[in-house]
Image (cartoon, rainbow, N blue to C red):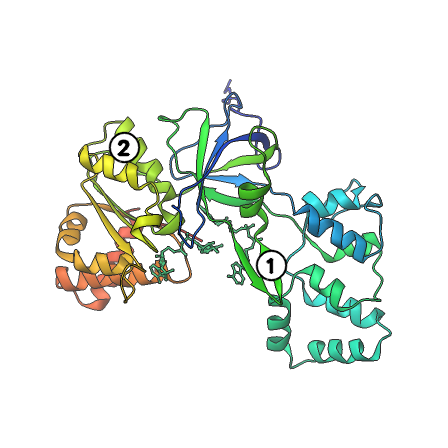
Amino acid sequence: MHLSTPPLSAYTKDNPLPAKLLENRVLNKDGSGKDTRHLVVDIAGSGLTYSVGDSLGVYASNRPQIVEEIIELIEATGNEPVVPPRLTAAVSLREALTTKLSLGGPTKKILETFAAKTTEVKQKAQLAELLAPGAKELREVFLGQREFIDLLEEFPGVKLAPQELADHLRSMVPRLYSIASSPKLYPGQVHLLVAPVRYESNGRRRYGVCSTFLADRVTRRKTPIPVFIAESHFGLPEDPAKDIIMIGPGTGVAPFRAFVQERVATSATGRNWLFFGDQHQATDYLYGDEWKRLLAEGRMARVDLAFSRDQPQKIYVQDRIRETAAELWTWIKGGAHFYVCGDAHRMAKDVDAALHQVIIGQGGLEAAQAANYVKQMKKDKRYQRDVY
Ligand SMILES: Cc1cc2nc3c(=O)[nH]c(=O)nc-3n(C[C@H](O)[C@H](O)[C@H](O)COP(=O)(O)OP(=O)(O)OC[C@H]3O[C@@H](n4cnc5c(N)ncnc54)[C@H](O)[C@@H]3O)c2cc1C
Ligand SMILES: NC(=O)c1ccc[n+]([C@@H]2O[C@H](COP(=O)([O-])OP(=O)(O)OC[C@H]3O[C@@H](n4cnc5c(N)ncnc54)[C@H](OP(=O)(O)O)[C@@H]3O)[C@@H](O)[C@H]2O)c1
């Protein structure tokens, strides 16, 4: 008879662990324009295990202030029972708005509901303009600058019942954060590197739901944080003798701290090369002391830095990649694995272009051959990206 291995932990995405936060430290020094947090989450005794390269999934709560404002705007008490989308049991409106529903990203559907309900001529005209067949772009810009609360404020007089409101909102989804620690060095802990999202739009301060939940609203050792481990394709080479090249500007450096901790803990013989970048060396060299120590101890072969705002012209990690092309090519030819983590929109594309340039310039390949070379690297899992 085949006996299957029992699960190591009862905690999953559907049944997250109520974990506690042990540490919340700003890594940027005084005078920095950035705010990047080193967070330590306690998973001891939970049975949760992870590999370096995995992420932590986090279910956040919305800001109480926004929740109360919305309850007030729809003239409810917050105690009304509602059934959030995809759930079967009713919870209070306050609970639904706090943990079950996403209050951002309003859709066309709410504009249609408002258009059907409003009796004000000016509002009717504005909504008709936004809902006109050719107005997709106008509507997207309008909705993109707004959260749900803006619409409730901008269209006063339109009455939404609590359940009706819930029916217009999407479910709250968990956010992922790259794990920045090795369980071999920090058993029972998960370290994260989180940049709280804060910006302004449509005249309102905005706060990223999960990043500011973790950075601002979780009380250390008190507030439970519902978490789970999200396994990843992103990981170290199976052969510990392989060299690794890690490109991780900003919060992108998180998994590479875990990679190097793991390689040190397991006495992996392959060399480690990090490219890191951020705004200013004096204030934004994230985990700078750790990288310096690892270099001094010979655990890191190289750390190449690109501080974008320490000189008049921008310098980014891809500039350092091009500058070190000859050495990089010898590593790549020698079988090194190439990893990229961080911003997907610009950085990862520019780094990909730089990698192609290195292969063309140093390997003497045509563009099409370089593209095939990169394709093969991906196939061999020698080129991995974890970008967001
Ligand atoms: C595999 C993976 C790993 C990740 N690892 C990390 C990590 O290690 N560290 C980390 O900090 N994040 C990481 N992220 C990103 C993280 O999951 C969240 O997306 C991030 O924290 C924002 O979530 P939030 O809930 O705070 O913001 P949300 O409430 O989801 O708001 C974010 C949205 O706000 C809008 N927005 C943001 N900035 C602006 C602006 N300036 N102007 C206008 N609109 C804007 C955009 O629409 C954006 O999508 C990772 C993501 C993935 C998928
Ligand atoms: N999906 C997301 O939610 C997401 C993902 C990544 C970043 N962000 C946003 O960015 C904020 C900070 O993120 P972060 O700390 O990880 O750092 P980051 O903004 O990605 O910046 C890190 C470094 O990368 C530089 N950079 C900018 N454009 C680049 C490019 N094309 N190629 C290479 N490097 C480039 C930056 O320089 P300059 O700033 O001087 O140009 C900075 O020196 C967060 O608060 C978040 O709002 C959001």
Q: Residue at x 42, y 24 (%)?
A: 187
Task: Report whether 339 appears left or right of 77.
Answer: left
Which of the 4 quarters of the picture holds residue 259?
Answer: top left
Element type at mark 2: helix
Q: Which mark is residue 355?
A: none
Q: Residues within 10 Å of mark 1 (few under 14, many from 20)?
A: few
- Mark 1 lies within 8 Å of ligand 1 (Cβ measured): no
Q: Position of residue 312 (x, y in %)?
A: 28, 66
Q: Give the residue type at disc 2.
A: Arg
Q: 293 or 182: which is nearer to us?
A: 293
Residue 48 position (above or below residue 317): above
Which of the 4 quarters of the picture holds residue 157?
Answer: bottom right
Q: Residue at x 17, y 59 (%)?
A: 323
Reading the image, the residue beneath label 1 is: 205
Element type at mark 1: strand
Residue 190 position (above or below residue 234): above
Q: 33 or 233: which is nearer to us?
A: 33
Quick one: label 1 or label 2, which is nearer the N terminus? Answer: 1
Q: Residue at x 60, y 66 (%)?
A: 144
Q: CA distance from mark 1 to mark 2?
A: 42 Å
Reading the image, the residue beneath label 2 is: 263
